[in-house]
Amino acid sequence: MSWLILMVVFFLCAFRAVKDKSHTVSVVIPALNEEKTVGSVIEAARKSDMVDEVIVVDDGSTDNTAGAAEDAGATVIRHTSNRGKGAALKTGFKHSRGDIVVFVDADLENMTTEKIERMIKPIITGRADLTKTRFRRKAGRVTELTAKPLLKFFFPEIKFEQPLSGQFAAKRSALEKMKFEEDYGVDVGIVLDADVLGLTVREVDIGSIHHDMASLKDLNVVANEVVRTIVDRALEYGRITMMDSMGKSIRMCILGLSLTTLGVFSIFFIRAIPAVLGVIISLTGFIMAVYYFLRLIRRSIYVFRRSAGKLQTVRSFIYMHFPILISALILIAMISTLLGAVEVDDGKISIEPTSGNLIIWKKSNENRTFDVRGPYRVDSA
């Protein structure tokens, strides 16, 4: 019996191996003056049974990065000048053959095969279209001071711990739909494209990473390029319109609904406001609400037509303006309920509660009559 169990286990393992190799995986490593570390990163990638090819793009290095990469067994593509990280990723992607492409920075001192495979597995198993990495290290200054505040404002649905991580993997079919920025904005740009396209993105933990800290001058360059990319994407995907033009229309629409509510209540319940003034307030609020509602529809159509991912755009819109939208629904419910309870009989206007209930608490031994006056019609008491 034991030999039968062993055979079943063997066949299951063999089936899993065949299933895993139904995908081809390319690892692309952009490198600029990284001759000391690029070899170990290549070695970590080549040790994985999941990886079919390793490509290093030497982005105009002045040291022996290309030679070290070739000695480690990678395919090397050279840029004659420094064109930027995004340009290096684009070149590597163009020359890769895998239907899954992994991007890994060349300056990591402790990259391992296990960390690379953690990025690949969710895609192979169908749990993700793209994987981003997080690691046990305090987020950098660019991430905390620039990227996260801007993402929270324009793309609040994105809540990655490390949105600027340069270690990620994706299906080729997904990457072909994305725009590769030429510079350091490429990493966050791909995350934003994936979000708008409605792709499944998972953030995987790869433990700790070690690399040299960038100088303040370099960080300033990175920050500028990241900010430019986020703002460009926000403009391209209509997020600025959502926050500015559409947001203003929603706020003004709610102001109109609030004025309508105030006017209707003043007609029946506020003696200090003349009935004529209450009618004027109601009509003014109603006209304002209708006008800005029509503007909101027009701007929404404009944004959705430009958006690549319609469903994700709707979700982001709701996420951005959720409290305001709920307030608008409450006001609409109040106004419609109030107007629905209005009755006009022989030139007299009265309001009956929709529930039709008037509850008076009293002790059981009491037997009194109540004279109820006001805008309510009481059938029995």
Image: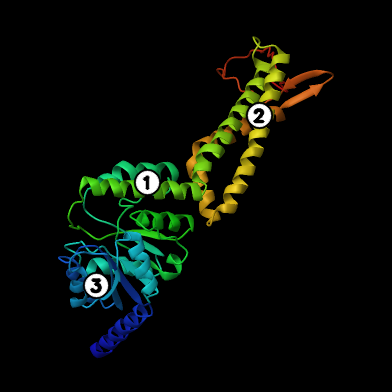
Residue sitting farthest toward the front: 80
Name the residue located 60 percent from the left edge and 48 percent from the top edge.
Answer: 302
Instruction: Indicate whether 93 appears above or below 317.
Output: below
Report x, y in % for residue 137: 21, 51
The residue under the point 53% across, 57% down is 308
Residue lying furthest top: 272
345 left or right, relative to 126: right
Circle 3 sits in a helix, a strand or a loop, which is it? helix
**Three-letter residue code for mark 2:** Met
Answer with left or right where residue 47 lies relative to residue 380.
Answer: left
150 or 38: nearer the viewer: 38
Q: Residue at x 32, y 81 (%)?
A: 17
Name which of mark 1 and mark 2 comes first in the sequence.
1
The image quadrant where one finds the C terminus is top right
Residue bearing mark 1: 227
Cα separation, mark 1 vs mark 3, equals: 31 Å
User: Who comes first in sequence, dot 2 or dot 3?
Assistant: 3
Mark 2 lies on residue:
288
Q: SS for tag 1?
A: helix
The numbered disc on residue 45 is 3
Which numbered dot is residue 213?
Answer: none
Q: Does the image show residue 44?
A: yes
Q: Quarter of the image holding residue 216?
A: top left
Task: Give the mark, 1 or 3, whose residue is nearer the N terminus.
Answer: 3
